[in-house]
Image (spheres, grey):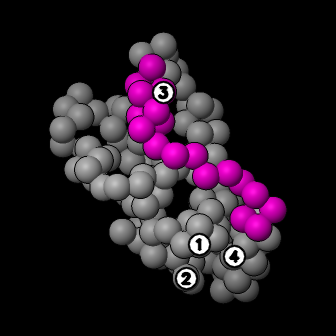
Amino acid sequence: MVVDTSLIIEHVRSKNKLNTTLYQISNQPDLFVSAITIYELYMGVKSKTMDDDIKLVLSNLTVLPFSNEVALKAAEIYHDLKKQNKLIEFRDIFIAATCIVNELPIATLNKKHFQRIEGLIIA
């Protein structure tokens, strides 16, 4: 399962980590994160504590790269969404493409956007 940026942000910001969605799914085998999520997380780092929390979370996840195959799938998703006039943020398209190419579901708090993408399984 691919952990979306939204779950990690919720976890890092939470005072009670045991109540976060990320904590609730942490017993799942084989949890992954997209390289795009790493970019998104570090784009928003505001303190040493936040940086340390992110590093701790990421140490328990396997990073999936943004490959040529993922890039091509992302372009396909972009065109499909554009035709339907349902475009979403490009980084979410990259994360969804990573999931589809690797045949993995996504765990996210942003179901509304990800539901627009055909072939993406939302956990």
Q: Earlier in the sequence, mark 1 or mark 4?
A: 4
Q: For the residue labelled by badge 4, is the local secondary structure a helix, a strand or a loop?
A: helix
Of the two numbered discs 1 and 3 on the same chain, state the one appearing first in sequence: 3
Residue matched to label 2: 119
Q: Amino acid at mark 3?
A: Lys
Residue type indicated by callout 1? Ile
Q: Check the picture and name the quadrant holding the N terminus.
A: bottom left
The residue shown at (19%, 32%) is 16
Measured in 3D between alpha carbons, the distance from the residue under mark 2 to the one under mark 4, in whole angstroms, is 10 Å
Residue 108 visible in the picture: no
Q: Are marks 2 and 1 in contact (CB under 8 Å)?
A: yes
Q: Quadrant of residue 99?
A: bottom right
Residue at 62% x, 77% y: name it: 86
Q: State which tag comes first along the sequence, 3 or 4.
A: 3
Q: At label 4, which amino acid type do we have?
A: Ile
Q: What element does badge 1 sit on?
A: helix
Residues 46 and 1: in front is 1
Mark 1 — residue? 100
Indicate which disc, 2 or 3, sits on the residue closer to the N terminus. Answer: 3
Is residue 35 inside the magenta stretch?
no
Which is more foreground, mark 1 or mark 4?
Answer: 1
Whether residue 43 appears in this view of the structure is yes
Mark 1–mark 3 CB contact (< 8 Å) = no
Q: How packed is label 1: few (under 14 Cα within 10 Å), some, or many (20 or more)?
A: many
Report which residue position mark 3 lands on: 55
- Name the element at disc 3: helix
Helix, strand or loop at label 2? It is loop
Residue 105: image quadrant is: bottom left
- Dot 2 or dot 1: first in sequence order is 1
The magenta region covers: 52-70
Which corner quadrant of the image does residue 88 belong to? Answer: bottom right
